[in-house]
């Protein structure tokens, strides 16, 4: 369907029910970084060694850099390939939440460390060569085929950050920091399921030759990016092997949701936790009509507790 430039979105026109279901999932999952009590982690943070603090801080800064790329370049690049107006609305939500994911890291640093130390973490990410090479490749890829852009966006969101996630999730004593990261991962997994669905839709409409060429190009880009992710894990972590395994697991998970591979085996407890989280995000949301789904909910006093 061709749209007039200023055609209003009618949410009762269910061109694709998954758009409306995903809108509900994202709005139901809405959260803000300032509502997670990171200060409760201060004692656990100060009990860590300086090296452990540096690894976690640098990992979080690396995660923030990827989210900043997604909000500024990655998500906006997907709008040109949108299939429905509702899809563009969902992409707007994704863009906003990527910005929340970026800001969440600053909130963690504000509660756990001083500005100078936080700045050193960000400087590490900004100057880390493998990570910058990843971003350079992603920027180039975002100028190409629409389905390639979607695949690369998802690689950046779930695969490239896995080593950074491992650095935090391997310290469960930082309970609220883990909670913040879990919020981020939950959003990323919803993005993954939705955009993978759109990827599969687009892929089915192409010829067999075009499908093979696109999958080969995406796989080649993915392998280059994964090699760089392994390099960044080595530069950051004393236990890079475990982080590498999580990167590989996330790529296998992504291949499965894109329709390009099978369910991977869980390699460790952190992979198991992520798989459980992914299973929860894939729960079916039934949308009879958007009017029923948007039933009025009255505000409560605690909605204003910031």
Image (spheres, rainbow, N blue to C red):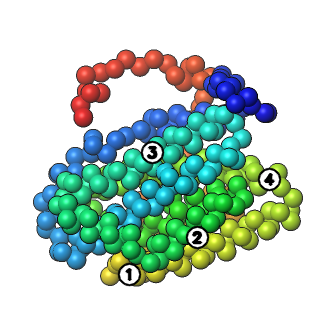
Q: CA distance from mark 4 to mark 1?
A: 40 Å
In primary-sequence order, the first of circles 2 and 1 is 2
> Could you say which disc has been placed on residue 204 in the image?
4
Q: Earlier in the sequence, mark 4 or mark 3?
A: 3
Give the foreground label among 4 and 2: 2
* Residue 281 position within the rendered picture, expressed as x and y whole percent measured from the top left: 50, 46
What kind of element bears circle 2?
helix
Label 2 to label 3, Cα distance in Å? 23 Å
Residue at horizontal 83 percent and vertical 55 percent from the top: 206
Instruction: Give the alpha-carbon distance from disc 2 to disc 1, as whole Å.
Output: 19 Å
Disc 4 secondary structure class: helix
Q: CA distance from mark 1 to mark 3?
A: 29 Å
**In the image, residue 59 above or below residue 91:** below
Q: Which dot marks residue 235?
A: 1
Determine which of the numbered discs, if any, sits on residue 244 in the image: none
C-alpha distance separating marks 4 and 3: 29 Å
- Labels 2, 3: front one: 2
N-term-proximal mark, 1 vs 3 = 3
Please give the name of the residue rendered at 74% of the width and 49% of the height, measured from the top-left corner: 201
Element at label 1: helix
Residues at discs 1 and 3 in contact (Cβ within 8 Å)? no
């Amino acid at each position: 369907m061709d749209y007039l430039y200023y055609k209003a979105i009618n949410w009762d026109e269910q061109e694709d029910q998954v758009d409306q279901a995903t809108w509900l999932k994202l709005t139901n999952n809405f959260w803000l970084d300032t509502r997670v009590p990171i200060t409760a982690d201060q004692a656990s943070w100060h009990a860590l060694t300086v090296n452990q603090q540096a690894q976690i801080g640098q990992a979080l800064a690396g995660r923030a850099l990827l989210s900043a790329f997604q909000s500024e370049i990655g998500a906006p690049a997907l709008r040109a390939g949108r299939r429905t107006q509702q899809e563009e609305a969902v992409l707007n939500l994704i863009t906003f939440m990527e910005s929340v994911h970026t800001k969440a890291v600053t909130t963690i640093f504000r509660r756990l460390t001083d500005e100078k130390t936080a700045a050193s973490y960000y400087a590490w990410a900004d100057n880390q060569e493998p990570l910058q090479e990843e971003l350079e490749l992603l920027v180039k890829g975002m100028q190409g085929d629409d389905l390639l852009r979607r695949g690369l966006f998802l690689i950046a969101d779930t695969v490239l950050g896995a080593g950074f996630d491992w650095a935090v999730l391997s310290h469960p004593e930082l309970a609220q920091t883990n909670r913040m990261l879990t919020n981020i991962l939950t959003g990323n997994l919803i993005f993954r399921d939705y955009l993978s669905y759109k990827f599969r839709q687009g892929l089915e409409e192409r010829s067999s030759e075009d499908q093979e060429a696109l999958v080969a190009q995406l796989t080649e880009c993915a392998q280059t990016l994964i090699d760089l992710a392994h390099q960044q894990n080595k530069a950051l972590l004393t236990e890079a092997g475990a982080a590498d395994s999580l990167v590989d697991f996330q790529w296998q998970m992504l291949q499965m949701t894109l329709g390009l591979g099978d369910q991977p085996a869980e390699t460790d407890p952190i992979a198991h936790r992520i798989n459980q989280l992914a299973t929860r995000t894939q729960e079916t949301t039934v949308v009879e009509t958007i009017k029923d789904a948007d039933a009025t909910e009255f505000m409560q006093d605690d909605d204003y507790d910031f």
